[in-house]
């Protein structure tokens, strides 16, 4: 193999050599190369093995449509499979490896799959591995995975970061070829805010790969001039290395910016990739077109390439793809490859065109090379690289031509898939021999080759026209652009999608190894619709999404079924247009940043005291506070419960939702949203409230206090705070806008602590000092007071969740951490402990209070033993539906307490209830255990549960059956209140 | 008992990051602000605000300020009323000024407020704000209540520098600071006091 | 999808919550079984549909959005009850 870099030309920087490695060998390329161009420049033609048959494969294209040259890029934690060598920019120290080969690229053991190809035919997943199913996991899947792989991802954590961002514009231009550049320039000059998104690293599109002149300049030079003007416009933003992958509603486009993919390691504080939402009022899709190959025997040999790619390598990268290059083209465009190669001094072995006549100017492009008109390439040969092609003439005679590269051109397919993302289909044009965009997403227009307008002149004109149309539609004044001189190209093309005479395997989809025979088989087996064809054969379902195979596959199916191409149909594309890494979609939101974390004001204080935390929605709450020597949670929690019931404890309850309600009609409003009565609540008092959904099921509960005549504060559960706020705003804004009140969340404003235990009053007296009267007469049970603590506004509620004498004290959140400390100081002589959510939970179960486990979205007030709270004096949300026979059936599972008959046994939440002699089957299910705790007070486990006819079954012995743990224990049904059923303590 | 020591929402959470020579983004926590959610309840509400503070509360998502006091439009008939004279007494002062024409709810501790400026502030905000902050669209006095990295934010623009202020619910301060630091680090973030 | 909130301007869908058909009316307190229809029965409209959306991450307004459920084209957006806007 020899170097194939041409002596001059190309847009590479020959002064900046770049070292890189491929399959362990060192190579050199230049800045401006892709991995593919650098490999070709080094004479490396074999770059990978195919997916199913492990056939040798080489570089096929020079762009994002590449089906073959997929490599593993980078090492270690950054190893990334399936990277297109044709778009991967070369950087110093780049390390790439070929894929799907073992032990080496040149000698691959699994190439034997070719001999087993009968089992890899279309539908082989469905046919070969149908039976017995048990072998899937052990045999089939590992076999398929090893045999038909596409490289290996690193299994280590990605060390790089990803970002998400949003940008807005008047006009989004997708692509920066001649059409895109002119659209951007026109709209930009008119004053519109323009974003140009270009997938490649330079602007220019095909202009970089062609030798046409525009305004007397080579395409690249002309591009540079336009780019300079665009850069000078403050209202134009150019986004290079940015691929638009999806069109979404409301002018929203998904785009991926490869910020650091062209570098060994992202620069400090920069992401690897950035996922953009681009919001555009108008869009010009100028994504160009992808050349269509012709399918013939052995067309997957390394060296068989798209003719346009051969031109790209010669003109943009200064690389001759081969030493003897033959051209097989069905249209005028392919002849330009011969012309450009000859101009660079590369040997053109032959030009083969199935047309019997071509225009003299086109014919002249082949110079002195051999020309075969009315002929086709039937088969290509060469084990690890192309050596010769068999050309068959119209009369059936054939000739064998030596060549190491065959440049193939079967016409062009517009890159219009983005235009079909809103469910539209493309339409076949018999004159353009291409699928053209039909109906487009709102605000999107298609320009240039993407619209089937393949000549440079047409593309430039489209860009000007659509750039102006977009600007004018947005109220800007159209700008005129002087006529641009371009060389005259012709795009005449004949329809030829495959060579039926092929004698060897002819590949339609190179990436998924789908052959013409597979399509024929699908047709014979009845999978004739394009959607079936695609799924049955996997045509077009690889990572390249069939960019170089779909149309050929469709045309072959049309031929097989004797239908036209439009009759055969076309597949619709869906986002994303190109693969997008999951990391880019996640952005910053991974690991601990998966979602935002809410921290109460006392969080740092709790951290300093060694608390263990638990997630409650977005909140982190202290779960318990282990003391030195305590090794298990139960010891800590039991100690905390005993300390509270024996003296005093404090617990941060700031996370509960708090909603301020103000106005003359708050009372009337609360009567309608709560099941029980609130308008009668006196100032200075709080009341427990139960909120139902309109379907009669319990939604939430909490206490609401009346601080002044027209000023209330409601508490909700931590989890439902947002939902309740939304519900109340619906009730206010939609159902009863006539009620005069306002509401806003004040959850964040107040840091609130429960102070519980027989010594809690004494503790608070110490805190507030003797000037504040906290006697039972002054602050009775369910009192709500606004007072001052060291001239700070504070609120004191006499509420109890623990069943002890207890209070909740609230201060503005900035004082929250300090208050936690002050409460502990004030309780120093009283044995005060901080306690967490776990001890809180133990005490509420001991007291039979329901919480989230019981308010499970299926329970009614009656089920929870709260049926008497449903007021009959007023209407309220859920009242009518709560009275449905199904919701008042006494056989419904209802709240009970549970105790193990053998007091030494542990209860399990989730265990199902069965009658003593009942079989453990669903028909006998009588409810389940909702909450269990170890009661320090009683010295054994206790539970709450929802049991059919529960309240009538106190005293009965039933079974708690836990199939998951294999436990089946006898439990006694008791009233839900396990401790201090008379409620003596809380009135302290 | 000793006095309770206050702690601001972003205390200990903001850290300079990235290139320090010419930081593209400057951030400072604005402490000592009075904040209150205010609802208009009667037609003469604006006149009472005007007679008390010389400004008319905007009916759109705009902020109007007299220097010491600002009314930030956060919803129909709803404002975040900000006082630079401190939290103490702010709610009561407003409630007295507005009487029965408005509801006033103290939020001085409900939000942490950041003042963010610098050459790269828009480039930073682009990484989180899903609203168009281009100077032709979002200008001094513009307000947006929105979501940044799943965190609720009220943003208003102070001047053309551009300088912005942002109110973030207090419990989210740590997560928001993390987003801001990560997003601004490439441009350099300097914390000012 | 983007919704043009009458207060906040054009915002992306993640800021909103959906509540379905805005044509339903909460029945009078003693309407009885009509409540079953109100709570459970909804048409599954293919085409223009007036529906409730809540701008929970913005101004907290309940909105009525008229939308084509097939194309997501939005024809109008207004406050659910204009009279609450004072
Ligand atoms: Zn809004």
Image (cartoon, helix red, strand yellow):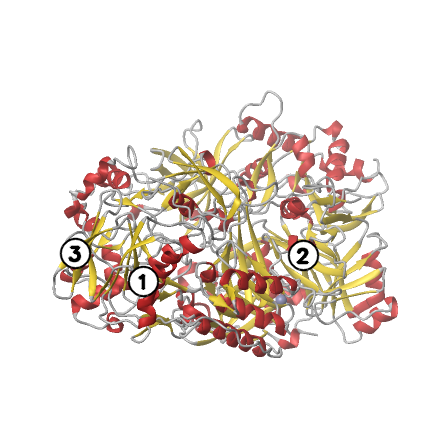
Number of other residues with Cα within 10 Å of mark 1, as a class: few under 14, some 14 to 19, many 20 or more: many
Q: Is residue A118 visible?
A: yes
Whether residue C78 sits left or right of residue A335 in the image: it is right
How far across and how far down the image is residue C9, in percent?
A: 62, 69
Point out the quarter of the image occupied by ligand 1.
bottom right
Task: Specify the label residue B122 is tagged with.
Answer: 2
Question: How far is disc 1 from disc 2 in space, using C-alphas?
Answer: 55 Å
Of marks 1 and 2, the one in the foreground:
1
**Pointer 1 and pointer 2: residues touching (CB < 8 Å)?**
no
Task: Specify the label residue B116 is tagged with.
Answer: none
Number of other residues with Cα within 10 Å of mark 2, as a class: few under 14, some 14 to 19, many 20 or more: many
Whether residue A392 sits left or right of residue A777 in the image: it is left
Q: Secondary structure at mark 3?
A: strand
How far across and how far down the image is residue A733, in percent?
A: 61, 70
Residue at numbered disc 3: A399
Residue at numbered disc 1: A366
Residue B192 sits in quarter: top right
Q: Nearer the viewer, residue A62 or A362?
A: A362
For the point 23% across and 55% down, the residue is: A537
Whether residue A846 sits left or right of residue A367 in the image: it is right
Rendered-image quadrant of the N terminus of chain B: top right
Q: Nearer the viewer, residue B170 or A950?
A: B170
Same chain for mark 1 and mark 2? The answer is no
Chain for mark 1?
Answer: A
Q: List the single residue furthest toward the left.
A: A396
How far across and how far down the image is residue A288, in percent?
A: 43, 65
Compared with A29, A662 (above or below) is: below
């Amino acid at each position: 193999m020899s170097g194939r870099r041409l002596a001059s030309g190309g847009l590479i920087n020959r002064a900046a050599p770049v070292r890189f490695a491929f399959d362990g060998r060192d190579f050199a390329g230049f800045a401006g190369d892709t991995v593919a161009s650098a490999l070709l420049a080094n004479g490396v033609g074999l770059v990978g093995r195919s997916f199913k048959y492990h056939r040798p494969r080489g570089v096929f294209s020079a762009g994002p449509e590449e089906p073959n040259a997929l490599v593993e890029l980078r090492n270690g934690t950054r190893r990334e499979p399936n990277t297109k060598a044709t778009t991967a920019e070369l950087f110093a120290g780049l390390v790439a490896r070929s894929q799907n080969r073992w032990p080496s690229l040149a000698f691959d053991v699994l190439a034997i799959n070719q001999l087993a190809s009968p089992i890899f035919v279309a539908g082989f997943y469905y046919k070969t591995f149908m039976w017995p199913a048990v072998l899937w996991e052990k045999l089939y899947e590992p076999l398929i995975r090893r045999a038909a792989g596409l490289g290996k991802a690193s299994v280590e954590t990605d060390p790089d970061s990803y970002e998400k961002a949003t940008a807005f514009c008047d006009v989004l231009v997708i692509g920066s070829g001649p059409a895109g550049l002119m659209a951007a320039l026109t709209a930009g000059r008119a004053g519109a805010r323009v974003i140009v998104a270009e997938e490649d690293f330079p602007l220019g599109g095909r202009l970089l790969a062609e030798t046409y002149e525009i305004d007397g300049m080579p395409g690249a030079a002309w591009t540079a001039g336009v780019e300079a003007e665009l850069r000078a416009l403050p209202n134009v933003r150019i986004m290079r290395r940015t691929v638009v992958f999806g069109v979404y509603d409301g002018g929203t486009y998904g785009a991926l910016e490869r910020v650091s993919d062209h570098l060994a390691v992202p620069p400090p504080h920069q992401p690897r990739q950035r996922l953009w939402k681009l919001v555009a009022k108008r869009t010009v899709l100028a994504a160009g077109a992808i050349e269509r190959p012709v399918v013939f025997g052995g067309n997957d040999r390394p060296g068989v390439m798209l003719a346009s790619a051969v031109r790209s390598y010669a003109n943009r990268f200064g690389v001759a793809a081969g030493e003897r290059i033959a051209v097989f083209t069905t249209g005028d465009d392919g002849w330009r490859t011969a012309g450009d190669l000859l101009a660079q001094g590369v040997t053109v072995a032959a030009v083969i065109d199935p047309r019997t006549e071509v225009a003299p100017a086109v014919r002249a492009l082949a110079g002195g090379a051999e020309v075969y008109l009315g002929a086709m390439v039937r088969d290509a040969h060469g084990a690890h690289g192309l050596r010769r092609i068999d050309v068959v003439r119209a009369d059936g005679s054939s000739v064998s031509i030596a060549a190491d590269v065959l440049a193939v051109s079967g016409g062009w397919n517009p890159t219009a898939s983005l235009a079909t993302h809103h469910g539209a289909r493309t339409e076949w044009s018999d004159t353009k021999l291409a699928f053209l965009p039909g109906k487009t997403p709102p605000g999107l227009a298609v320009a240039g080759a993407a619209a089937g307008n393949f000549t440079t002149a047409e593309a430039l004109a489209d860009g000007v026209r659509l750039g102006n149309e977009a600007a004018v539609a947005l109220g800007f004044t159209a700008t005129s652009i002087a006529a641009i001189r371009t060389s005259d190209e012709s795009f005449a093309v004949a329809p030829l999608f495959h060579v039926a005479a092929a004698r060897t395997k002819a590949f339609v989809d190179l990436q998924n190894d789908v052959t013409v025979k597979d399509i024929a088989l699908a047709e014979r087996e009845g999978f004739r619709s394009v959607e079936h064809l695609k799924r049955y054969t996997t045509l077009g379902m690889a990572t390249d999404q069939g960019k170089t195979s779909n149309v050929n596959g469709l045309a072959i199916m049309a031929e097989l079924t004797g239908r036209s191409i439009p009759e055969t149909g076309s597949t619709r594309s869906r986002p994303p247009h190109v693969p997008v890494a999951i990391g880019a979609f996640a952005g910053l939101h991974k690991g601990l940043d998966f979602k935002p974390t809410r921290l109460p004001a006392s969080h740092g204080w709790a951290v300093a005291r060694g608390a263990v935390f638990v997630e409650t929605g977005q909140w982190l709450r202290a779960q318990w506070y282990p003391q030195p020597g305590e090794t298990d949670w139960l010891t800590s929690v039991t100690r905390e419960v005993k300390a509270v019931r024996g003296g005093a404890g404090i617990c941060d309850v700031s996370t509960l939702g708090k909603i301020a309600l103000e106005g003359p009609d708050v009372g009337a409003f609360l009567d309608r949203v709560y099941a029980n009565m609130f308008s009668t609540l006196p100032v200075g008092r709080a009341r427990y409230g139960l909120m139902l959904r309109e379907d009669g099921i319990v939604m939430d509960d909490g206490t609401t206090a009346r601080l002044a005549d027209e000023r209330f504060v409601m508490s909700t559960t931590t989890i439902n705070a947002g939902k309740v706020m939304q519900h109340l705003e619906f009730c206010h804004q939609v159902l009863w806008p006539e009620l005069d009140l306002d509401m806003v969340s004040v959850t964040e404003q107040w840091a609130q602590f429960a102070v519980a235990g027989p010594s809690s009053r004494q503790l608070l007296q110490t805190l507030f000092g003797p000037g504040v009267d906290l006697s039972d007469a002054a602050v009775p049970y369910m009192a709500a007071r606004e007072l001052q603590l060291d001239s700070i506004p504070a609120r004191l509620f006499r509420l109890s969740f623990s069943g002890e004498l207890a209070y909740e004290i609230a201060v503005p959140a900035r004082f929250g951490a300090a208050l936690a400390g002050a409460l502990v100081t004030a309780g120093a002589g009283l044995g005060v402990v901080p306690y967490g959510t776990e001890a809180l939970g133990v005490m509420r179960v001991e007291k039979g209070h329901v919480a989230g486990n019981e308010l499970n979205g299926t329970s009614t007030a009656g089920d929870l033993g709260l049926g008497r709270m449903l007021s009959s004096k007023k209407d309220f949300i859920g009242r009518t539906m709560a009275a449905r026979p199904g919701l008042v059936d006494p056989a419904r599972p209802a709240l009970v307490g549970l105790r193990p008959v053998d007091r030494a046994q542990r209860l399990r939440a989730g265990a199902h209830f069965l009658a003593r002699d009942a079989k453990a089957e669903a028909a006998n299910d009588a409810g389940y255990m909702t909450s269990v705790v170890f009661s320090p007070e009683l010295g054994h486990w206790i539970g709450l549960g929802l049991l059919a006819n529960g309240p009538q079954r106190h005293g009965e012995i039933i079974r708690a059956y836990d199939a998951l743990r294999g436990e089946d224990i006898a439990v006694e049904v008791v009233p839900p209140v396990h401790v201090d059923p008379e409620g003596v303590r809380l009135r302290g | 008992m000793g006095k309770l020591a206050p702690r601001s929402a972003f205390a200990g959470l903001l850290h300079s990051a990235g290139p320090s020579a010419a930081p593209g983004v400057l951030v400072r926590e604005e402490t000592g602000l009075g904040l209150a959610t205010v609802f208009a309840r009667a037609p003469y509400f604006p006149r009472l605000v005007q007679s008390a503070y010389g400004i008319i509360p905007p009916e759109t998502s705009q902020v109007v300020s007299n220097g010491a006091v600002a009314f930030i439009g956060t919803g129909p008939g709803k404002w975040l009323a900000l006082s630079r004279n401190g939290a103490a007494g702010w709610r009561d002062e407003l409630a007295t000024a507005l009487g029965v024409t408005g509801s006033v709810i103290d939020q001085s501790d409900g939000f942490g407020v950041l003042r963010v400026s610098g050459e790269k502030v828009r480039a930073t905000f682009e990484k989180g704000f899903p609203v168009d902050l281009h100077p032709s669209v979002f200008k001094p006095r513009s307000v947006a209540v929105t979501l940044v990295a799943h965190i609720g934010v009220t943003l208003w623009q102070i001047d053309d520098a551009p300088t912005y202020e942002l109110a973030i619910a207090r419990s989210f301060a740590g997560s928001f600071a993390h987003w801001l630091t990560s997003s601004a680090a490439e441009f350099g973030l300097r914390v000012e006091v | 999808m983007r919704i043009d909130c009458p207060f906040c301007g054009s915002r992306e869908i993640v800021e909103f919550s959906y509540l379905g058909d805005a044509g339903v009316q909460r029945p009078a307190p003693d309407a009885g079984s009509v409540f079953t229809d109100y709570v459970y029965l909804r048409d599954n409209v293919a085409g223009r549909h007036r529906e409730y959306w809540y701008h929970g991450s913005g101004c907290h307004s309940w909105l009525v959005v008229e939308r084509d459920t097939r194309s997501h084209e939005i024809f109008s957006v207004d406050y659910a009850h204009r009279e609450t806007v004072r």
